[in-house]
Image (cartoon, rainbow, N blue to C red):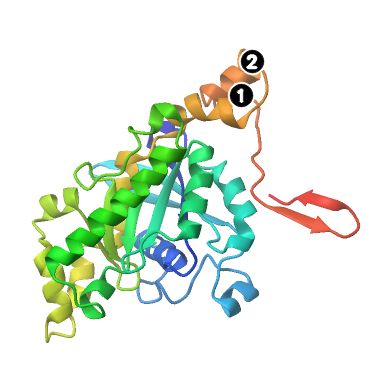
Amino acid sequence: MTKPEFIRNIGVCAHIDHGKTTFSDNLLAGAGMMSEELAGKQLLLDFRQDEQERGITIDSASVSMVHVVEDSEFLVNLIDTPGHVDFGGDVTRAMRAVDGAIVLICASEGPMPQTETVLRQALKERVKPVLFINKTDRLIKELKLTPEQMQQRFIKQIIDINNIIKSIAPDEYKELWQVSIEKGSVAFGSAFHNWAISLPYMKKKGISFKEIIDAYTSSDEGAVKKLAKRAPLHQVVLDMVTSHHPNPVQAQKYRIPKLWSGDLDSTDGKSLLDSDPEGRTFFVITKVVIDPQADYLAER
């Protein structure tokens, strides 16, 4: 916490039912904060009873995790945001509290209208995106696509996301924030089955895409679990986050002018731009509730 270069403040944003909360569960399991067996089933960040009953995220939920890269420990602060269009305000407020976003899409459906909406909200708040293509197993098990067909689908989905970024991101970031398999800012996987891959991880561990297809077509019932052990989702995704999302000091240089309307040359303005831990404390409101007696109330 005292070394901002090792902090990442991130959010997860996606279209409803693309697996966002299951995905977040996996990150928590990887950080040792819940059982690996319950990841994807417990929906830990859907802590309200109505969220559990309806199977959707209503409130933005936040959690802090530690992720180790080589010999360095990173503090990753994660906000899981709603995907349903009715709760878009929560997404906008959450995006003001983070510096990076994991944009999650379903491999079979691709970017949907709400994907564009939540990505638009992130980009307008100057939040840098990376991409996770979830439910990759559906292409193998249900659609039975060939590797070439899967590749074509992935390329189209990445192009679609990059077109959104190019059309909405601030001019100086339209090209810089494009996501890319080659750069390592795109990962694929299955949150439900707890595995993921990216090009840097595949090179590092010697994993091929053929092994993933073989795991789902194998007669060995434990093949997919073995894949999850070899390429755990949390390891791949948080490696991507620490590599491609900015730390607070880097991000506030270009985010504070957007987030704060005060005098940037003032003492407060300079401390915000520099993420000065000795500066005055400022709050970002991420949840607003309506009280019948008192109108709007900031909750947290």
Drawn side of residue 186 relative to residue 18, left or right? left
Which residue sits furthest top? 265
- The location of residue 36, given as percent across then percent down, is 35, 71
Q: Nearer the viewer, residue 136 or 59?
A: 136
Q: Earlier in the sequence, mark 1 or mark 2?
A: 2
Q: Nearer the viewer, residue 166 or 265?
A: 166
Drawn side of residue 158 relative to residue 224, left or right? right
- Three-letter residue code for mark 2: Thr
Where does label 1 land, which residue? 279
- Mark yes or no: residue 14 visible: no
Disc 1 vs disc 2: Cβ atoms closer than 8 Å? yes
**Residue visible at 11% across and 50% down?**
203
Label 1, secondary structure: give it: loop
User: Which mark is drawn over residue 166?
Assistant: none
- Mark yes or no: residue 213 visible: yes
Q: Nearer the viewer, residue 244 or 14?
A: 14
Q: Residues within 10 Å of mark 1 (few under 14, many from 20)?
A: some
- The location of residue 193, given as percent across then percent down, is 30, 73
Q: Is residue 256 above or below residue 212?
A: above
- The location of residue 201, given as percent across then percent down, is 18, 52
* Separation of marks 1 and 2 at Cα, in angstroms: 8 Å
Where does label 2 land, which residue? 267
